[in-house]
Amino acid sequence: GQQLNQSPQSMFIQEGEDVSMNCTSSSIFNTWLWYKQDPGEGPVLLIALYKAGELTSNGRLTAQFGITRKDSFLNISASIPSDVGIYFCAGAAVHGSSNTGKLIFGQGTTLQVKP
Amino acid sequence: NAGVTQTPKFQVLKTGQSMTLQCAQDMNHEYMSWYRQDPGMGLRLIHYSVGAGITDQGEVPNGYNVSRSTTEDFPLRLLSAAPSQTSVYFCASSWLGGSSETQYFGPGTRLLVL
């Protein structure tokens, strides 16, 4: 089945530093999504990408949909303590040329920010 | 809108007991799904539904049943709980089709099976 490999698994950075994480897959996706999960909460959508090559920003967050449709990255600039959490990539599974509505999730990147 | 709601927030079961995890959404979303989250494994799809009366299996369906009698509700049933089902369970919903595939997640149900 389709799988996503997300890296790094965890990061411990200093406040103010930039962060980069990525997801790769052996399969293509029509949609890439990035979620953040705070402790004890459900994932919350950060950025959605719908077109290969698309680069989208949301405040200090920037994400790109790889041109091969098999990868995506998320950058966080000038990190702050509230950026702490688990970040997940997700791809919308396809069957043929149709979207199935199912999401495949990466394993998550745990981010810790030292003030 | 309340979004996606889940009950209970926490539950402790003994092996062999049954229970139903409730999920409801008030956004008129066609698509609803259940995931389980285990450390280091991300979220794995258990069951999903593309509309009332339609359900299908996800990646890890064994030990779980679902039904979708209304658009709003999508309960997850554990008929005979096992320790391997100790996990955090998330319900999610979204519109179907086109570019509207972003899923909204509930706050989760933390289940411990002894």
Image (spheres, rainbow, N blue to C red):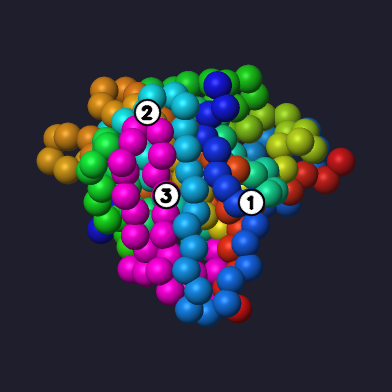
Question: In the image, what residue type sits under mark 1?
Answer: Lys
Give the quarter of the image for residue A41: top right
Is B58 left, or right, of B6 in this rendering? Answer: left
Is B49 left, or right, of B25 in this rendering? Answer: left
Cα–Cα span, label 2 and label 1: 22 Å
Question: In the image, what residue type sits under mark 2?
Answer: His
Residue identifier under label 1 = B9
Q: Are marks 2 and 3 on the same chain?
A: yes
- Please name the residue shown 37% across and 63% down the image: B64
Which is more toward the observer, B93 or A10?
Answer: B93
Residue identifier under label 2 = B29
- Please name the residue shown 26% across and 48% down the image: B55
Q: Earlier in the sequence, mark 2 or mark 3?
A: 2
**Vertical comparison of B16 with B46: above or below:** below
- Please name the residue shown 55% across and 69% down the image: B86
Which quadrant would the C terminus of chain A be assigned to in this image?
top right
**Residues packed near mark 3 inside 10 Å, few (<14), some (14 to 19) or many (20 plus):** some
